[in-house]
Every structure is written in structure tokens, then in C-alpha cells.
Image (cartoon, grey):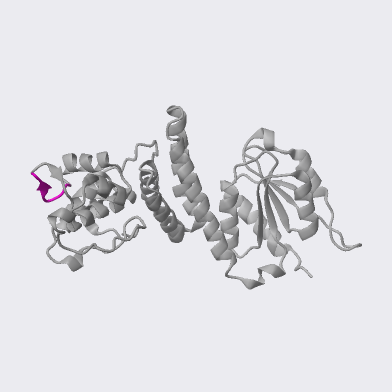
Amino acid sequence: MTNGRVIPTMQHGDLAPEARMTTGQLARLLGVSPTTLRSWDRRYGLGPAVRADGHHRRWSTDDVAMMREMCQLTATGMSPAAAARVAQRHAHRTDPTEVPAGRIPLAAQDDEAEAVARHEQAGSGLPLGRVRRECRGLARAAMRMDAFEVQQRLREAVAAHGPAVAWEEVMAPALRAVGRKWQASGERYVEVEHLLSWHISATLRHRYVESAARDDQRALVLPVVLSCPAGEYHTLPFEVLAAVLADDGLTVLMLGTAVPPDALMSTVQRVAPAGVALWSQTRPTADLRLARRVAAARWGVHGARTNSPVLLCGPGWPSLEDDSLDLKQVKSLRDAVRVLTELHRGAMPMR
């Protein structure tokens, strides 16, 4: 399997000459451009062992396996030069059983690959600065528009580090770098940002669903509500928060983008949440009147009515001078997790 695609006829050894792949066919198989393959051939000698008529590239199954490993290594953040040396070394092994099968885990590169990668920068064409190696690999795959590698890198980052660290040290730095590239280049690279954002969202939502399905007792406790005010369409930070809270065993009710005020108020009165978190990316969507209205809403049986504390999350909210109406301003993902966890643990079970 390469980049999620199954190659049913691939076996070790050469194909018949008429069955060898062209450069265009290999590029489509691997999810890279033909220009990239030709560049790797010119720069690193990473081409087919045999050329048809002495000129045209024709790729055998062994050649395809070598190029597949090249793509896998560069997707982990290794520079093309380093990856080419490792892929060529593996391609010249005489024992086929020593050639790695399938994808190479981020944490299981061989010693030579690790040594080379430490001495060479794994650039992606993005202004990343000092980031985790996984972030460089993710950025490289995104710039190649390699959706399969992007999803693989994201899944491995979340599995290895959890959603909070994966977001803070792998996903968010790559997104910010793509955003800077986009701003500096006009409308170019917007497709990269859209691709990366979509796959990050898909990964986080999948993690949330998996975590929420593990505990049948969640329905017995009050949920926390995550919502964006009307006009707010940035949900990725709250998708991270939902995944982290679900990992920690909290019951999360995610309302998503641009929720009308009356719909939010109706939700609060119906589900009696332990806390409500509102995300605002920009000042125009930071509706303090709505936040105070939610915080002042009372619910519960007569004589024991109470309310839901409200967390203001995101850079759009102005600084608060007081929190007399149970408004709590948080400055980071970890602060939001801490406060919501405390509220959740202190909430009474639903009856």
C-alpha cells in the first residue's frame, strides 16, 4: 500500500519491460509531480535502474519501492538528500526481507536516517523556524498536496503525543507557516491551507468520536458546551479542546460555528451544562452581551436553581475588569482544559 493506495501486482523483482511504469504513472501513484521525480533523479541519482531506449524513464517494482520509501522519509521531515541516501541503501540490499514493509513510523527510523537528519535541515519551503521533526514532515506533505501523507502524519502525531501536544507543536505551527506563506504570496498556497485545515479537523473529530465512545457513563454527568457566537467560523481551536476533554473523560456538547444567540440559550436551559465555553477569533464576534446573558441564565428545580459559568476563549475577547457574572477569561488551551475539568468534576449528576 502506498499513500493509501493498494498496488495488487507489486512484488519484489522487475516487471516485464512493457509493464514498467512511466514517470507520469509513478507520479500519480505516489501523489507527487513528475517534475519532483525528475528533480530527485538529477540531484540525487534516484532514478530507474534501466531506461527505455536509453532516455525514457521506466520504473520497475524495485524502483517504485525505492521511490515510495523516499516519499515516506521526506514526509517525516527528513531532507530529500538524506532520504535519498537511505532509500538507495535499502534498494541495494540483497535480502528483500530486510526492506521495510509499509509505512515507516515516525519514532522508528533506522540509526543512519536519524544521524543524517540531525545534520541536515528538512526544509519544506515554509518559514517554520525551530519545530518538531513531525511538523516539518507535515508541512512538506501539505506543500506537495499529498493528502494521504498529511493524514498519516496527523494520525501518528496524535497517537504519539495526544491531541494537545500534537496541536501545539505539530499542527498549529504548520498552519501558521502556511498562513504566512499565503499572505506573502497573494492568493497562492490558499489551497494548501484549506487542505491542511480540513485534515486537521478530520483527525481531531475522529479522535473525539473514538474517545467519547469509550465511556458509557458520560451520560450520567453534566456536559460542558462549546460554541462559537454568531458570525464566528473558526472552530479548529475548539475541535482541539473537544478532543482533549473527551480524552480526559468529560462529556462534551460541541455546537460548532456561528450559533444564533437564542439557540445557545435554548441549549443551556435544556441540558444544564457544567460550563459553557465561547470562542471568538476576532473582536467583531466577541459578543459580551450574549456571554453575560448565558452566565445569568438560571436552570434547575425551584429552590435550587443555579447557572452555568461561562469561559471566554480566543483572542477576540476584550480584557475583563470583573467576573461578577461568572465570566471567566482563559488565555490558553491548557487553562481552558483545567477550568472546564474542574467545573465538570464539581457538577452534580443529572437526575
Please indicate whether residue 105 sits to the left or right of residue 217 in the image. left
Which residue is most to the left?
54
Residue 336 vs residue 141, the one in the foreground:
141
Quick check: 62 above or below 310? Answer: below
| Figure quadrant of residue 267 | bottom right
Residue 346 vs residue 280, the one in the foreground:
280
| Figure quadrant of residue 292 | top right
Give me the residue at 68% from left, 59% from top: 342
Q: State the image coordinates of residue 239 (x, y, percent, origin top left).
A: 58, 52
Quarter of the image with the C terminus is: bottom right
Asked if residue 325 shows in the view, the reply is: no
Quick check: 206 above or below 290? Answer: below
| Figure quadrant of residue 273 | bottom right
Please indicate whether residue 7 sits to the left or right of residue 217 in the image. left
Residue 163 vs residue 27, the one in the foreground:
27
Magenta highlight range: 47-53
Please indicate whether residue 24 sits to the left or right of residue 215 in the image. left
Magenta region, main secondary structure: loop
In the image, residue 156 lies in the stretch drawn in magenta: no
Q: State the image coordinates of residue 225 (x, y, percent, origin top left).
A: 69, 54
Quarter of the image with the N terminus is: bottom left
Give me the residue at 59% from left, 61% from top: 246
In the image, residue 52 lies in the stretch drawn in magenta: yes
Tally of numbered discs: 0
